[in-house]
Amino acid sequence: MSTITSAIFDALTAVGALTDAQPAGLGFKVWDRWLTPTGPGATPEAFDATKGGRLLRNIVILEGGEYGHPSGDAGLDARRWDSFPTVYFFAEAHRNGKAAVNDAVKLADQALHTLDTIANGNEHVTYRMDSRVPIEDSEAFPGNVVAIVRFRATGARAY
């Protein structure tokens, strides 16, 4: 898991309102890999066997690569960069599930908006929501809805 994915994972799992069991929290599980019921890297805990294997409430964080920052280096003795990790919010396809996804996206945005991590020992990284695909039926997991949020992680590396 990359430093950025790890920082996002740690930040989201620390939000009790997001991960605590219902009714105290929203009951989301957080993952750093795609969900699959069987095989290598399986995540069987992400599925509800009593409901035909439908997904439970899950958040999936996927790596976003690294790209040069559009503003350049601005005269710094450092190289600015961006990464765009993608976060998927899954829940059951009914009113309560959709409301939970909306609430989860807000909580994640709040948690990451204030997050400032250190990558590679000396690079400060900040996080902001970059784009969001609104809630829609999940093609990958029928019976569930998904909202897809891309975050922008920005850091600087000394030359």
Image: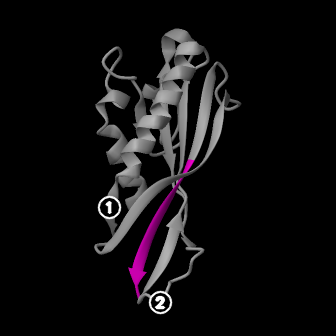
Q: Is residue 154 magenta?
A: yes
Q: Secondary structure at mark 1?
A: strand
Query: Residue shown at 43%/70% (left/top)?
Result: 155
Does the rendering let one see residue 36? no
Dominant secondary-structure state across the stretch colored magenta? strand
The reply, left or right, for residue 90 in relation to residue 4 is: right
Position above or below: 57 against 149 = above
Q: Quadrant of residue 70?
A: bottom right
Q: Residues within 10 Å of mark 1 (few under 14, many from 20)?
A: some
In this rendering, is residue 15 above or below 6?
A: above
Question: Magenta residues, as a range?
Answer: 150-159
Of the residues shown, which amino acid type is indicated by label 1?
Thr
Image quadrant for the C terminus? bottom left
Q: Residue 54 in the image: x percent, y percent?
A: 57, 19
Q: Nearer the viewer, mark 1 or mark 2?
A: 2
Residue 132's x, y, as percent? 61, 43
Dot 1 or dot 2, earlier in sequence: 2
Report the residue marked by disc 2.
Answer: 75
User: Percent position (x, y) of residue 56?
Assistant: 49, 22
Rendered residue at 43%/54% (across/down): 5
SS at mark 2 in the image? loop
In the rendered structure, find residue 117 and report the number of the disc placed on it.
Answer: 1
Q: Residue at x 49, y 46 (%)?
A: 61
Is residue 40 magenta-colored?
A: no
The residues bearing labels 1 and 2 have C-alpha atoms spaced at a distance of 23 Å
* Crowd around label 2: few <14 · some 14–19 · many ≥20 (10 Å): few
Amino acid on which disc 2 is placed: Gly
Q: Residue furthest top?
A: 50
Q: Are marks 1 and 2 in contact (CB under 8 Å)?
A: no
